[in-house]
Image (spheres, rainbow, N blue to C red):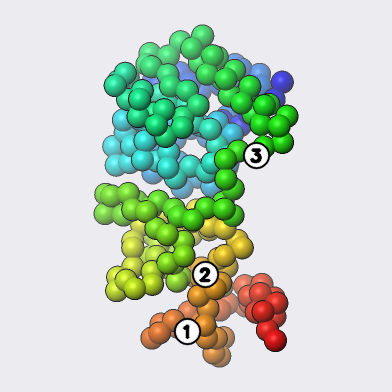
Amino acid sequence: MTTLRCAIVDDEPLALELLESYVKKTSFLTLEGSYSSAIQAMKYLPEKPVDLLFLDIQMPELNGLDFSHMVPPTTRIVFTTAFEQYALDGYRVNALDYLLKPISYTDFMQAVNKAVQWFEMAQHNNTPAPASKEEINFIYVKSDYKLVQIELSKILYIEGLKDYIKIYLEGEARPILSLISMRAIEEKLPSSRFIRVHRSFIVQKQKIKLIDKGRIIFGKEYIPISDSYKQELQNYVNEHTI
């Protein structure tokens, strides 16, 4: 039987503990992480990707429905909630299943078996989970308590500031500020289009118009190129140099 990597996101400690116990006693599941908020999960999931995510819907700061749009398409979602009225919303975002609290082990196993069948069928048909990150055209980020859609084609560069990032867009005077790490946003972006040039900067390759004295120039802004990332950028430039 297919072994699935799992993670749980729930702000209720008892619900989190219950699902942890269910995962641990199911031989073909491995628990990669348990998170008490979507914000916490957003920080660690890129470093520990999973096949199956048990996701609570009603949580403070960032609810499960909004967070589900940020989850990689290779991860299937099982929503968990105490409110039956969220069931329709769950299926609208293409959730694999929906579990109503309190969750019994029988209901849990029905959802897990559905996940196993989905992954085995996908593998048998040689069809990877819906669109890879190389095919995406936009991302969602949390900014000022709102979920903002950003078209990848408009991104000039991204600047990292501790736990925050600034996303600079073409035609926009102000950057979009979001509570997310550089590592997490880099994992979301297709490497065919974006490149890390410094510990604090990611740029869109096709937006690079001018490089001067070890810096990428965007109007009046100068993006430094650090030694540790210089070779990868040089390789890209060499591929497009006549």
Residue on which the image places disc 3: 128
Tell me the amino acid under the disc marked 1.
Ile
Name the secondary structure under disc 1: strand
The mark nearer the N terminus, 1 or 2, is 2
Relative image position of residue 45 (x, y in whole percent): 52, 43
Q: Position of residue 2 (x, y in %)?
A: 69, 25
Q: Which residue is mark 1?
A: 217
Q: Position of residue 196 (x, y in %)?
A: 56, 68
Q: Nearer the viewer, mark 3 or mark 1?
A: 3
Q: Return the residue nearer the eye: 20 or 96.
A: 96
Q: CA distance from mark 1 to mark 2?
A: 12 Å
Amino acid on which the number 2 mark rests in the picture:
Gln
**The C terminus - image quarter:** bottom right
Residue drawn 58% across and 24% down?
115
Residue 9: x, y in percent?
A: 43, 32
What residue appears at the point 35 percent right and 25 percent down from the top-left corner?
88
Q: Amino acid at mark 3?
A: Pro
Determine whether 141 is above or below 71 in the image.
below
Real-space Cα separation, disc 2 to disc 3, in angstroms: 26 Å
What residue would you read off at disc 2?
Answer: 204
Check the picture and name the quadrant holding the N terminus.
top right
Q: Image quarter for residue 127? A: top right
From where the camera sits, is residue 23 visible? yes
